[in-house]
């Protein structure tokens, strides 16, 4: 198989011809047709996350068909369309796993970090962590749901909006554009704050109630807000924008220091600040069902597999509308 391999961090991915991976017990091998390019991939290739193994095939939003079952598989069949996402192992025994919070399992393992991912023609995944994809969206369009979508969904749940709530989105990349569409489908009003003009244009086209530049004031108090921008001062702005009882959720895995907060303006009146870490499989199943019900098709910018380096560069430079996807049909 052809794969784009990260041999050393802070260097380009190298195109390699590798032997097909063999699925172990409980694993399946998937013929990949598309793989989303995520900001976390950038953290791995740029060295902002420590390497868990090298060489490594990045990518954790892969879509394809099951082509080989390892010993003992019972959930999937050859030919099934499935998605491979970030979470690929939890221990099943710790206090978090036993209380429906497997996203916090200290023994979890991740695709495209601990194990090879989807920047390749074939990938292996434990069948219990693969998502069946019955929805109407084509392969390249469903890929962004597998990380950007799932994380956005978990953040939206943790924002705990009231019915017909007002939601603020700070930063408008791949994850936010999924949240905007699904939150509107659920009857919420969505306000977007982002510094990039092309992201503001996309938010307006997708039905945002208002769109503001980074330093802009929102026209209404919010019931909840999700901060996608990894900038601590934005957390403060979001806390000031939510009304009494409102919740601000930080969705990123990194954040610059949050400035000292004025208690009256930012936290009193039972405002809450919460973070999101990864997701449970339940989050993933819910998100895929919600996206299918909303008939939501993510905006994608396609690149051939061998242009993975260019796709990552475009993402790093904020030049991608919606989500960058490696489309193996190109
Ligand atoms: Zn566990
Ligand atoms: Zn991701």
Image: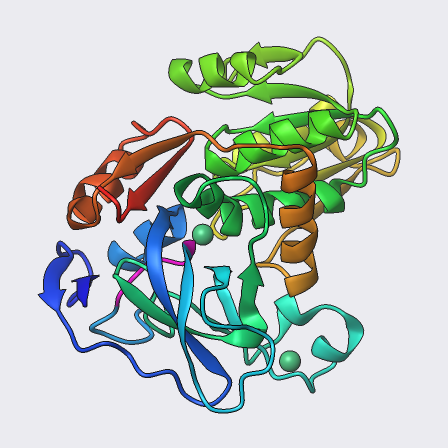
The quadrant of the image that shows the N terminus is bottom left
Visible residue check, residue 173 = yes
In the rendered image, the vertical position of residue 278 relative to residue 92, given as above or below: above
235 sits left or right of 2 in the view: right
The part of the chain drawn in magenta is 57-62
Between 79 and 210, the one lying in front of the other is 79
Residue found 63% across the figure and 52% down from its top: 276
The quadrant of the image that shows the C terminus is top left
In the rendered image, the vertical position of residue 147 relative to residue 219, given as above or below: below
Tell me which secondary structure the magenta stretch mostly adopts.
loop
Q: Position of residue 104 (x, y in %)?
A: 64, 69
Residue found 55% across the figure and 70% down from its top: 129
Q: Position of residue 308 (x, y in %)?
A: 21, 47
47 sits left or right of 88 in the view: left
- Is 60 magenta? The answer is yes
Residue found 34% across the figure and 42% down from its top: 325
Visible residue check, residue 47 = no
- Count every numbered label the image shows and give the total: 0
Residue found 18% across the figure and 78% down from its top: 19
- Is 49 magenta? The answer is no
In the rendered image, the vertical position of residue 238 relative to residue 251, given as above or below: above
246 sits left or right of 68 in the view: right
Q: Position of residue 109 (x, y in %)?
A: 48, 75
Between 6 and 222, the one lying in front of the other is 6
In the rendered image, the vertical position of residue 119 relative to residue 55, given as above or below: above
Q: Position of residue 193 (x, y in %)?
A: 55, 20
Ligand 1, image quadrant it occupies = bottom right
């Amino acid at each position: 198989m052809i794969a784009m391999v990260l041999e050393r961090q802070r260097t380009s991915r190298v195109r390699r011809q590798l032997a097909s991976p063999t699925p172990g017990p409980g694993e399946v091998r998937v013929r990949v047709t598309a793989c989303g390019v995520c900001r976390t991939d950038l953290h791995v290739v740029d060295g902002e996350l420590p390497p868990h193994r090298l060489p490594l095939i990045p990518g954790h939003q892969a879509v394809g068909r099951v082509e080989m079952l390892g010993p003992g598989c019972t959930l999937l069949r050859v030919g099934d369309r499935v998605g491979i996402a970030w979470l690929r192992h939890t221990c099943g025994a710790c206090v978090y796993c036993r209380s429906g919070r497997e996203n916090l399992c200290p023994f979890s393992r991740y695709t495209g970090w601990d194990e090879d991912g989807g920047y390749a023609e074939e990938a292996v995944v434990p069948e219990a962590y693969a998502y069946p994809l019955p929805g109407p969206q084509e392969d390249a369009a469903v890929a962004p749901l597998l990380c950007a979508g799932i994380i956005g969904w978990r953040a939206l749940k943790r924002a705990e909006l009231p019915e017909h709530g007002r939601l603020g989105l700070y930063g408008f990349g791949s994850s936010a554009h999924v949240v905007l569409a699904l939150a509107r489908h659920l009857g919420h009003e969505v306000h977007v704050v982002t510094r990039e003009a092309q992201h503001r244009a996309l938010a307006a086209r997708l039905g945002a109630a208002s769109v503001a530049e980074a330093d802009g004031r929102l026209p209404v108090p919010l019931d909840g807000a999700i901060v996608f921008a990894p900038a601590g001062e934005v957390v403060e702005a979001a806390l000031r924008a939510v009304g009494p009882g409102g919740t601000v959720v930080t969705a990123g895995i990194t954040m610059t220091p949050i400035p000292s907060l004025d208690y009256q303006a930012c936290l009193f009146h039972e405002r809450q600040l919460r973070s999101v870490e990864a997701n449970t499989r339940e989050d993933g199943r819910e998100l895929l069902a919600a996206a299918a019900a909303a008939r939501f098709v993510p905006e994608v910018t396609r690149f051939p597999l061998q242009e993975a380096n260019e796709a990552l560069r475009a993402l790093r430079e904020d030049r991608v509308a919606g989500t960058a996807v490696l489309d193996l049909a190109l």
